[in-house]
Image: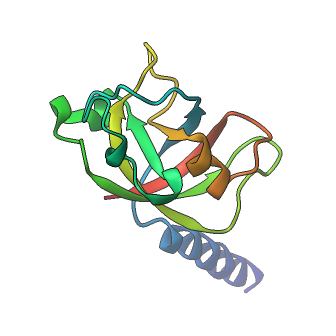
């Protein structure tokens, strides 16, 4: 009987955790200015959304430039020293990752990173959905 109760509790915990994950899982880091020129809109300042909540994406999301202008909702899941803030943000793709190889799935502007995580480290685990 005790094993049955334990199995039910473990199943409940696992299913509750699975419920919270709705999108894809990846990693995120931030990158520093200058942010222009970008691969999407060059030197146009108006490409950046309000609050500077924008990203550059790695090869897997770039889609030969079709990612330009896409919007993603993302949230921090984990990282070193518990960096996550409990909120989601909406970001706009404005560039291809400026580093080779790209260190993360998504490179956030400094403002976007600060909106979802404390800057204890440079890399966090994220959930994202288009």
Residue 82, position as x, y percentages in the image: 79, 51
The residue that appears at 58% across and 35% down in the rendered structure is: 29
Residue 67, position as x, y percentages in the image: 23, 42
Front residue of 124/57: it is 57
Q: Is residue 37 above or below residue 46?
A: above
In which quadrant of the rendered view does residue 116 lie?
Answer: bottom right
Q: Is residue 21 above or below residue 33?
A: below
Coloration of the structure image: rainbow
In which quadrant of the rendered view does residue 41 lie?
Answer: top left
Left or right of 40 on screen, residue 117: right
Left or right of 93 on screen, residue 106: right
Front residue of 76/7: it is 76
Residue at the top extreme of this rendering: 100
Front residue of 32/58: it is 32
The residue that appears at 30% across and 27% down in the rendered structure is: 59
Q: Is residue 44 above or below residue 25?
A: above
Left or right of 25 on screen, residue 118: right
The residue that appears at 24% across and 42% down in the rendered structure is: 68
Residue 119, position as x, y percentages in the image: 76, 42
Q: Is residue 23 above or below residue 31?
A: below
Front residue of 16/6: it is 16
Instruction: Classify the position of the N terminus by image quarter.
Output: bottom right
Residue 130, position as x, y percentages in the image: 31, 58
């Amino acid at each position: 009987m005790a094993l049955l109760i334990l199995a039910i509790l473990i199943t409940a915990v696992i299913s509750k955790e699975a419920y919270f994950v709705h999108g894809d899982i990846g990693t995120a880091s931030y990158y520093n200015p200058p942010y222009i020129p970008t691969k999407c809109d060059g030197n146009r300042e108006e490409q950046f959304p309000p609050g500077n909540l924008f990203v550059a994406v790695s090869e897997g999301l770039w889609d030969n430039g079709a990612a330009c202008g896409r919007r993603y909702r993302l949230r921090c899941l984990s990282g070193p020293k518990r960096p996550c803030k409990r909120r989601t943000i909406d970001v706009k793709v404005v560039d291809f990752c400026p580093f080779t190889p790209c260190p993360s799935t998504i490179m956030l502007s400094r403002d976007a990173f600060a909106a979802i995580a404390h800057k204890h480290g440079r890399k966090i685990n994220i959930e994202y959905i288009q």
